[in-house]
Image: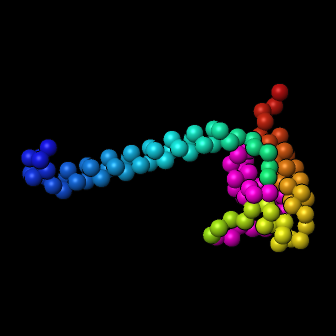
Amino acid sequence: MKRLFRRHPVLVSAFVLAVAVSLFLAGRLATRAIYWSQHRQEVIEPWMTPGYVGRSWGVDPHELDQRAGLPDRAPGRPLTLEQIAAEEGVPVARIIARVTAAVAEMTAEQAPPP
């Protein structure tokens, strides 16, 4: 291996870098796949963000925002349902009810016809 590295240092370095990046991305993919397989259709809680709810229920988070009447997403850190309720000055239960209704509607639309 040392001999190969001495003869082709750039090629061997590029290969090692490609293997390292591939392993990192494979690990990240496996971690996310395991996490989301365990967190499907969770009960909607105040600490969740609309994006988390959308991923958990398998619906488009942006469409969920629109249907539930939530504010547009600002770049940066997303707001939790509790923070959205505080900004709107309403109880968090009302926001959760709107999100739950929107999720139910969107899920029903995705269901295959009998």
Q: What residue is rendered at 12% in x and 47% in y?
A: 2
Scheme by which the image is coloured = rainbow
Q: Quadrant of residue 64?
A: bottom right
Residue 68 sits above or below residue 85 on the image: above
Q: Is residue 33 magenta?
A: no
Residue 74 placement (x, y as % from top left): 68, 70
Report if residue 60 is visible in the image.
no
- Whether the magenta-drawn stretch holds residue 52 is answered as yes
Question: Considering depth in this image, is 92 or 10 the residue closer to the camera?
Answer: 92
Q: How many marks?
A: 0
Image side of residue 24 versus residue 110, left or right: left
Q: Is residue 72 left or right of residue 97?
A: left
Image coords of residue 36 (percent x, y)? 63, 43
User: Residue 76's spot in the image, x, y percent?
Assistant: 62, 69
Quarter the N terminus occupies: top left
13 versus 34 height, above or below: below
Q: Position of residue 17 (x, y in %)?
A: 30, 53
Residue pictured at 53% horizontal, 44% vertical:
31
Residue at 79 percent across and 61 percent down: it is: 81
Which residue range is magenta in the image?
A: 46-75
Residue at point 75% right, 41% down? 41
Can I make out residue 33 in this image? yes
